[in-house]
Amino acid sequence: MKSERAGKVYLVGAGPGDPGLLTLRGRELLSRADVVIYDRLANPRIMEFVNPGAEKIYVGKRIGRHVANQQEINDLIVQKAGEGKKVVRLKGGDPFIFGRGGEEAQILARKGIPFEIVPGVTSAIAVPAYAGIPLTHRSFTASVAFITGHRRFDTSEAPVDWEGLAKGVGTLVFLMGMSNLPNITENLIKFGRSPDTPAAVIRWGTTPLQESIVGTLENIAEKVEKHAFKPPAIIVVGEVCAVRDDINWFERQPLLGKKVLVTRTRQQASHLVQLLERKGAGCIECPTIEVRMVKDTGVVDRAIEGMAVFDWIIFSSTNAVKFFFARIDQLGLDIRVLGKTKIAAVGSSTADAIRKLHLRVDAVPDDFRAEGLVEFFKGQDMQGRKVLIPRAVVARKVLPDALRELGAQVTIAPLYETIPPEIAPQTLELLEEENIDVITFTSSSTVKNFFKTVPADVIERIRSTAKVACIGPVTAKTAENMGLHVDIVPDESTVPALVDAVEYSFVQG
């Protein structure tokens, strides 16, 4: 009789890179998993769908640098399932297309461990589509073959029918073949394929980091070497590559090829990333802040319970809004506690967060800084007025000091704190490998924590290539004090304005 705590393994295809191509079934399983064992090619954005309480284990593999070998991965999957856990083995692309999913499934079957296969969109199909290359086309070919390029390609070892591929198949797609590209092209030409056959190499396909090089069998390896193309990439060989000139849709975006390092909280980075990616930017998320409610909520609790005495409540960030109303809910209360208290907000994003709660904002300065709100209150009678400011443990004193000078009685309620999180292994690998074009900062805390969380040698590497973009003058001042040269500051301190300023800097420069 099987134990009710018997575990189960789900071999899930993460798709080719674009998180939008993850299947609905895959997303559902990630949200329910106890353990997620994931590869390097699984987009870090997909990890946002994972159950927050799940154990996340990175087992990324790349040439010459394996976190875990295949036997260790197999043992890990069996071990976690044996503990009675729901295990998602998340694999880039499709588990059964050169993903060793078949081997892992066989081991599970032999061990008597229940499992399920969840197919993924394979990069062999998706990446050429994003590069404007149809694998079949009535005018060119009706056949296509997928070949692993990861093994040595000499005729004494590799079980590949080179003559059949060279002469009998219209479109060839090689996965994991970058290190063997010269051997691949040499063998295809040797066994009868014309040296003039169009060829393309696409790296980081379906993601905003996508780049493509086109050529012929004769010169594609030389072009790849010249441009220092690195894995992950796929190779497409065939006449269909010529169609790319007409239907290359994905790579015609204003920030295409620009790599942007986004430093923000895990919870807040998504909006900035979405806006940048719509313009074609390749975003690498490096959360430098983790925001959490303070353990001692005594001050804010007393303020909430005695809310009727306050004339104004001031929110200086969306985090303040989020945690303040979360605490109201935790106390078993609702927005009625605000009564007739007026609400002020620093910035349009903060004001929008308040309005989503069906509350009216009484004051939003044109200058999206504390100084702008100070100017507003100078025009109000603040003598003896009671003001509540729920905010971060560490914050600027400009606003409370100015209000006290105007005669107000100010209560500061420490509500949340920011701590530097650990950088995900995948993110650190990207920072070590990629040349960053822009690094964005949306608060002084992101600047300070960037220097705390990222290794010094990696910071120096980024500084040598990247423009620095700050959401406003306060953040820019902090960046300059940390030794950074600030290149981009929008006129309006909002995320959309920051994105527009980044685009403008490249269009003009």
Image (cartoon, rainbow, N blue to C red):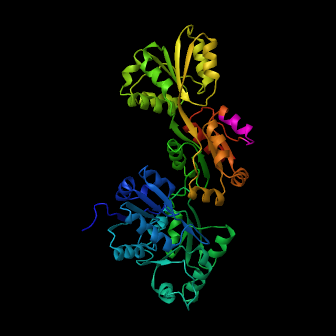
Q: Which residue is drawn at the image coordinates 51% and 87% (left, top)?
A: 162
**Part of the protein shown in magenta:** 475-485
Q: Which residue is depicted at the point 72% across and 50% down?
A: 463
Furthest-bottom residue in this view: 156
Residue 1 falls left or right of residue 495? left
Q: Answer above or below: position of 142 versus 281.
A: below
* 394 to the left or right of 323: right
Q: Is residue 277 above or below residue 125?
A: above
Quarter location, residue 14: bottom left
Depth check: 380 or 130 in front?
380
- Residue at image position (62%, 74%) is 220
The answer to whether any part of residue 94 appears in the image is: no
Q: Is most of the magenta stretch helix, strand or loop? A: helix
Query: How many numbered tags mark residues here?
Result: 0
Residue 407 x/y as whole percent: 60, 9
Q: Nearer the viewer, residue 274 or 292?
A: 292
Residue 130 lies, with reference to residue 454, above or below; the image says below
Quadrant in the picture for the N terminus: bottom left
Where in the figure is residue 255, as x and y percent of width and height? 59, 51
Is 185 displayed left or right of 26 in the figure?
right
* Residue 300 showing in the rendered view: yes
On the image, the x and y values in percent for residue 219 come to 64, 76
Return the residue found at the far left.
1
Direction from residue 151 to residue 432 in the image, left or right: right
Q: Is residue 317 above or below residue 169?
A: above
Q: Position of residue 251 (x, y in %)?
A: 54, 58
Residue 356 location, quadrant: top left
Asked if residue 506 is among those painted magenta in the image, a careful observer would answer no
